[in-house]
Image (spheres, coloured by chain):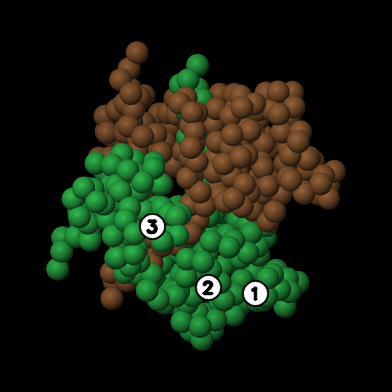
Chain colours: A green, B brown
């Protein structure tokens, strides 16, 4: 087994994959400079990141684009598709359901669940909204891999606990709450207000 | 002037601020352990992060919660409010417009702009959708600080250029595209599909 790859490197692999997707059709090789601009880092960082993967490159020519794409997809575990359930059928949950990048990347939203019984049975882009009571049965039946939490902050922990209890080991949390979780469950949080606060920091520093 | 603060530390300051907001009302002090759990790091990291700010702490007692909150807000530039325009009135743009965390944190969405003339004049939570032609005049009139891009990927660069041309120096990009930008403009990208890909990596490693 190879050594473990730093988390910051893992976080850039999707960006390199996107950079490869944006090459001219038929372009056989890709320089570290091209990948660098797609990830917003310098080319030395690209070479360092990719060195963990033992990539198919030729000095002075660049990386073999098709082989590197396959390698990145394999490394990221994207050689299969993943089933996703989104909890919370408000604006954010609905936006995520129709976000085109998910399906393109191999993530299929199989259901939305919501605590509002009145929403059950409605559809968003052919995805059916179900009562949250059905969360466990949906996870079992569809072999759900990833739970996305798009509920208000106050409901996030309970929903996370239900996902984990049903056997989901990966959670993407959009609610403004830090979740407690058992060992072995991976939680990533997208902190929308936090992103704006970081921009505010840079605005205030620029004065 | 103090030395510069590492970007990773800056990115955690909003989480510490949220941790402080979640203390019991009236709790006068806060330990680094409590802050650590709100940011998902260990307490040594909290102490190191906060050491950049020269925080109001007493050994063995913890940080003075109110003073630390003020310090973090000052450091992040949150002692004023910021005007935000969202480009793209699709599901994601609408979700962001009504996201409660923005207003709570001091960010006021003053308008949505969209290239679809048919959407102009509609309102979302009392925020009016305007034609994208009005972007420059809105930025000037409302002294817009931050532009949020919630358009399809193909439109993102043009919208970013228009924000920058109008004088906006901070951009939060949700479109799956890396933006070119002039020096002095801060761009943060929220990569929704990339977040799922990182979860896929952990799922595939866990096998």
The residue to which callout 2 is attached is A108
Foreground label between 1 and 3: 3
Chain for mark 1? A
Q: Residue at x 47, y 66 (%)?
A: A105
Circle nearer the viewer, 2 or 3: 3
Mark 3 or mark 1, which is nearer the start of the sequence? 3
Mark on residue A155?
none
Of A72 and B2, nearer the camera is A72
- Image quadrant of residue B194? bottom left
Q: Which residue is mark 3?
A: A27
Query: Could you confirm whether marks 1 and 2 are on the same chain?
Result: yes
- Quarter of the image for residue A150 reads bottom right
How crowded is the residue under tag 3: few (<14 C-alpha within 10 Å), some, or many (20+)? few
Do dots 1 and 3 share one subunit? yes
Q: Is residue B181 above or below residue A182?
A: above
- Compute the Cα span from label 2 to label 3: 29 Å
- Please state if B133 lies on the left or on the right of B196 as rendered: right
> Which residue sits at x=36%, y=46%?
A34
> What residue is shown at x 18% (from left), y 50% (from top)?
A59
Give how far apart the Cα atoms at labels 1 and 3 are.
Answer: 37 Å
The residue drawn where x is 71% and y is 33% is B135
Mark 2 and mark 3 lie on one chain; the one further toward the N terminus is: 3
Does any portion of residue B20 appear in the rendered image?
no
Q: Check the image and name the residue furthest to the top.
A: B1
In the rendered image, residue B24, in percent from the top left (x then y), is placed at 49, 43
User: Crowding near pointer 2: few (<14 within 10 Å), some, many (20+)?
Assistant: some
Per the image, the residue denoted by label 1 is A127
Marked residue chain, label 3: A
């Amino acid at each position: 087994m190879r050594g473990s790859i730093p988390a910051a490197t893992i976080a850039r692999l999707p960006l390199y994959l996107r950079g490869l997707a944006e090459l001219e059709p038929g372009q056989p090789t890709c320089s570290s400079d091209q990948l660098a601009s797609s990830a917003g880092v310098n080319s030395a960082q690209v070479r360092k990141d990719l060195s963990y993967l033992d990539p198919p490159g030729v000095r002075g020519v660049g990386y073999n684009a098709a082989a590197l794409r396959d390698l990145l997809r394999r490394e990221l575990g994207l050689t299969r598709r993943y089933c996703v359930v989104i909890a919370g059928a408000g604006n954010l949950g609905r936006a995520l359901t129709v976000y085109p990048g998910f399906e393109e990347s191999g993530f299929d939203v199989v259901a939305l669940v919501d605590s509002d019984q009145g929403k059950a049975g409605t559809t968003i882009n052919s995805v059916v909204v179900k009562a949250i009571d059905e969360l466990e049965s949906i996870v079992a039946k569809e072999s759900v891999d990833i739970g996305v939490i798009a509920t208000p902050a106050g409901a996030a922990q309970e929903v996370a606990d239900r996902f984990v209890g049903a056997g989901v080991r990966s959670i993407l949390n959009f609610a403004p709450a830090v979740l407690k979780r058992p060992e072995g469950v991976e939680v990533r949080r997208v902190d929308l207000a936090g992103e704006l606060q970081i921009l505010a920091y840079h605005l205030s520093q620029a004065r």
